[in-house]
Amino acid sequence: MGRLLAVDYGRKRCGIAVTDILQISANGLPTVRSCDILSFLKNYCEKENVEKFIVGEPKDLKGNPSDSMRYVMPFVNTLKKNFPDIPVEMYDERFTSTIAHQEMVAGGFKKKVRQEKAKADEMAAVLILTSYLESKR
């Protein structure tokens, strides 16, 4: 069994989360600049067995694709092209950034840490992957 790797793709940064080898829990990895995400994933996949990529699917409140899809779909297509043996699945990412900020407040993170967008992106990726895991149980 390989790991599941989630990406919260953004125009500037990508939050990344990965499961343990038993696919029980999700843990955040360091946030990566969007321009570096492909090389990061290639390096990661050389070291670890990745079974599937989960990419956050941006939707509006009505469940329709949001404007961000125009940035996410080229990334998804690039993933499929560069990793033809690893399936890519999109998963609803609505409210993950808001929930990530709320979790940071509830967790007692200092204001300075909460203002770091990279930390929020990482937590959003963890939320996407955790929700995905729960939906499969």
Image (cartoon, helix red, strand yellow):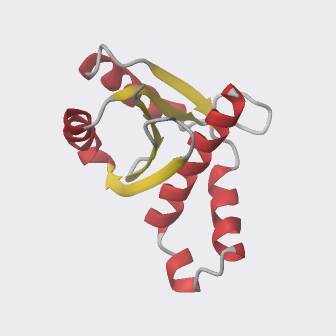
In the rendering, at what x and y percent does residue 108 appear? Answer: 65, 81
Marker count (numbered): 0
Q: Is residue 133 above or below residue 119?
A: above
In the rendering, at what x and y percent does residue 62 appear? Answer: 80, 32
In the rendering, at what x and y percent does residue 15 appear? Answer: 44, 51
Query: Quick check: can you spot residue 59?
Result: no
For the residue pair 91 and 1, the one nearer the viewer reads as: 1
Q: Is residue 29 above or below residue 50?
A: below
Residue under the image location 24 percent in, 44 percent down = 40
Screen quadrant of the C terminus:
top right
In the rendering, at what x and y percent does residue 125 appear? Answer: 52, 48
| Direction from residue 88 to residue 32 in the image, left or right | left
Farthest residue to the right: give it. 62
For the residue pair 107 and 8, the one nearer the viewer reads as: 107
Farthest residue to the top: give it. 84
Q: Is residue 126 above or below residue 51?
A: below
| Direction from residue 81 to residue 22 in the image, left or right | right
Q: Quadrant of residue 80?
A: top left
Query: Quick check: can you spot residue 91?
Result: yes
Residue under the image location 57 percent in, 40 percent down = 24
Screen quadrant of the N terminus:
top left
For the residue pair 64 and 17, the one nearer the viewer reads as: 17
| Direction from residue 65 to residue 61 in the image, left or right | right
